[in-house]
Amino acid sequence: MPSRPDRSSPDPFPIRTRSLRKRYGRVTALEDLSLEVGEGEAFGFLGPNGAGKTTTIRLLLGLLRPSEGEAIVLGKKVSRAVAWRGEVGYLPGDMAFWPRLSGLETLDFLAALTGRQASARAGLLKQLDLRAADLARPVRTYSDGMKQKLGIVQALQCAPRLALLDEPTKGLDPLMQQVFYEIVTDMRRRGATVFLSSHVIAEVERMCDRVAMLRAGRLVTVGSVVQLREAERRRVIADFSADVDVTALAHFGEITSGTGRRVEMLVAQSQIAALVARLGMLPLADLIIEHPTLEEAFLEHYR
Amino acid sequence: MIGVLFRHHVRMHRVPLVPLAFGLALFEWIMTVVAGEPSISRFLGETLRAAPPQLLALVNQDLLAIASPAGIIGVGYTHPFTLIMMAVWAVRVPSASLAGEIGRGTMNLVAARPVVRGAQVAAALLALLAGLAVLAGAAWLGTFVGLVGRPIEGVTAWRYLPVAAGMWVLFASAGSVAILVSALAREAGAAIAWSSGLLAGSYVLDYAARVWPRIASLRPFSLFRYYEPQQAMMAGLASYDVEILAAVAAAALLLAFAVFSRRDL
């Protein structure tokens, strides 16, 4: 039985990486990742396919060995002890089980390997609507959605202090996605830290306090959802009571659509005051200035 | 943790273990029935006198040994059927336990838990050894039941206990090499192909070295060189053979521990 990690660890960051790098021959999967995730935080990891999200999670778990740098999880160097993994719940991106084992056998086996009581299992099964009859069946008879539910239960059944979730809502119907959001909320209520990668930006925006964006193995940006949205260009929509030459506004920002009486622009925060002053000289009928959504912020980074 | 993983491997492989054990027991029982028929022993003796030495080398016995009832039963322990049954387990379990779990993606679930990599290698080894013990025991049980049911004068089942033990040691060694191969591979298919190839190559080398004097010096490089059922039947297991097979197993396992502890999963 592994020894329980010290919960009173002075490290306030359940996840800390320093110049983490992973190379496969000449291919760099992850480059110089330095990141800190605070206790009780929900941290979203965004990026297109191949950006390095899964590689990062696998490095954090010690499934991969870093080419350079180090990862510290729950106050322990990943490359050394393994006992800390008893406090971690992991949901892989590509969920695979032993086809002949039943759902219950799978959960029992993985809980035994974790070395802790599956204290949260009953609640999770109820929330995700996995019944005893479902758990008695071999996993090979499960649909993709059921496998994903079983994956969520195996990851969280021992009430982990840190959950590493790779594409957690993949294959779940919208109803179950809502249930999953509630599960994450419950986890956070009891102080657990959640680190999740996702392609679903709205999901990250809804669940996470902070977000990191990766592109081609490099960290593009990291910050709170609000900060990221505010850092991006504002969307400005101006309606005019008479036709105007909207091209004259081009030097304030990017015109995304424009007719004689209406113009939509993306404008840097520093240009807003000048633009408003210029618009005041025109026959302005209405003016809307919006923060971009996280999705727009994300797309800005990946265009 | 090793116990949890060991029980998991047993659960994954217990279904094929039953027919393998039953097949071996039945085969060795049949050999006692054949050996108990004087006409068959006589016919076999006459036939073998006419057979080329290359054919006799295939069963790793000399003519006089085969031509006796005790020898016929002994052939059951070197017969390709028996060796293949044992080899199936010696390749299947190691290949599935490490490379198979990686290839299927389930290694992610196991390795993300507080399990040291060495425990995974140790659990695979335990499952290998336990299954081989069941198979070697089943083979001997077939001989025992056959000889109790139809006693043959001057032949007791206890003479075959060291033979079965020698077979266990041989395949424990081969299985340890298969664990090393599995620790290096990313999929069960590749591990099975390499391990089967190495085992078949070792068998062919032993056979070829016995029938072709020019390569006789290469015979010590085959694991099958250290499996001598006839000698085990007469004088018990040769400690030298056991030591060599144990040394090969130990070296392969040490390498497997080292490789698997450092690799990406």
Image (cartoon, helix red, strand yellow):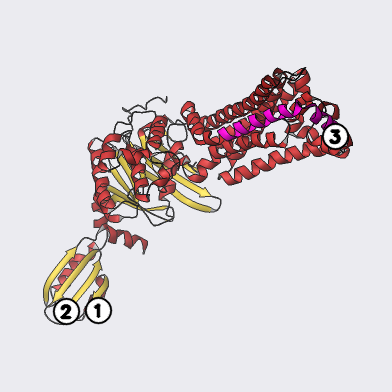
Quadrant of the frame with the C terminus of chain A: bottom left
Q: How many residues crowd mark 2 within 10 Å: few (<14), some (14–19), many (20+)? A: some
Task: Judge left or right: residue A4 versus residue B51.
Answer: left
A115 sits to left or right of B202: left
In the rendered view, tell whether residue A46 sits above or below residue B173: below
Mark seen at residue B48: 3
Kind of residue at disc 2: Arg
Q: Residue at label 2? A: A261
Q: Is residue A210 left or right of residue B179?
A: left
Magenta region: which residues? B18-46
In which quadrant is the N terminus of chain A drawn? top left
Question: Where, by quadrant of the figure, is residue A77 drawn?
Answer: top left
Q: Amino acid at mark 1?
A: Thr
Mark 3 to mark 1 CA distance (whole Å): 103 Å
Chain letter of disc 2 in the image: A
Given contact means CB atoms under 8 Å apart, are the residues at marks 2 and 3 in contact? no
